[in-house]
Amino acid sequence: MTRFALTFVRHGETRLNKEKIIQGQGIDESLSETGFKQAAAAGIFFNNVKFTHIFSSDLLRTKQTVHAILEKSKFCKDMTVKYDSRLRERKYGLVEGRRQSELRAMAKAAGEEYGIFSPPGAETLDQVKMRGKDFFEFLCQLILKEADQKQQFSPGTVSNCLETSLADIFPLGGNCASKFNLDNGTTELAANVLVVSHGAYMKVLFEYFLFDLKCSLPATLSKSNFTSVSCNTGISLFIINFEEEKVKPTIQCICMNLQDHLNGVTETH
């Protein structure tokens, strides 16, 4: 079996988040003062975690968030971030730069639900899903290839206990599993991946994990909470397992939209 940890973080707050204005891909807004504080708090939360790969959307608000996280890191400060356009927020077309209330009104006028409505020029949810699926499959193949090469050239080499640095900060929490429950404790994590992305995009990708890949959830986490939009710098952790006889990976959600690091940080959803 090959396993790796996959942590998602939504970017910090922007002024337009606070004002409930849709940014999508066309409005490349900077983090607000609160957003920088949130990102720094996430960095402090992760400061002892050893990441092997770091990916981010190439939009400004995610770039600033991942930079703030790495600035606090003891182990990853000088790591190269791979910016990937497949991690961008959903494209909202005509309504980018306009208030969420306008999108709601347009959806109502069209007789469609707000969450699935696609205004003119926007990506459909299926298009966002295909972007997310493409990135996830690319990531899985990358980790499997690297794990195979390590085994080939360094057989018997033990990893640097990547799970230990995660277990130290993910043992308990409101939306976490009661224990850091890794199904097969004898198999070391092959990689520990950090991804910084966007709320609507992550919601669609997590729905793919849940409904297509049958992601298992902590007992305390409902499907509705799992598929809700994350708060700014909300943290979600998954363990991805590949078994030799299976074509698709199995996914275990350890926590969803963790906000413990935001205690004491003023935030606006």
Image (cartoon, rainbow, N blue to C red):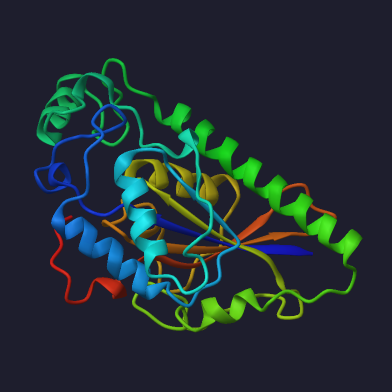
Q: Is residue 13 left or right of residue 222?
A: left
Hey, which quadrant is residue 73 in on the image?
bottom left
Any part of residue 19 in sight = yes
Q: Position of residue 18 (x, y in %)?
A: 12, 49
Give me the residue at 31% from left, 59% from top.
Answer: 233
Residue 145 vs 37, above or below: the answer is above
Q: Position of residue 23 (x, y in %)?
A: 23, 34
Residue 82 vs 34, above or below: the answer is above
Residue 210 vs 167, above or below: the answer is above
Q: Position of residue 9 (x, y in %)?
A: 39, 57
| Quadrant in which the C terminus appears | bottom left
| Quadrant in which the N terminus appears | bottom right
Any part of residue 224 in sight = no
| Front-most of residues 229 and 163 | 163
Q: Is residue 129 left or right of residue 268?
A: right
Residue at the extreme front: 78
Q: Position of residue 129 (x, y in %)?
A: 49, 35
Give me the residue at 55% from left, 65% from top.
Answer: 51
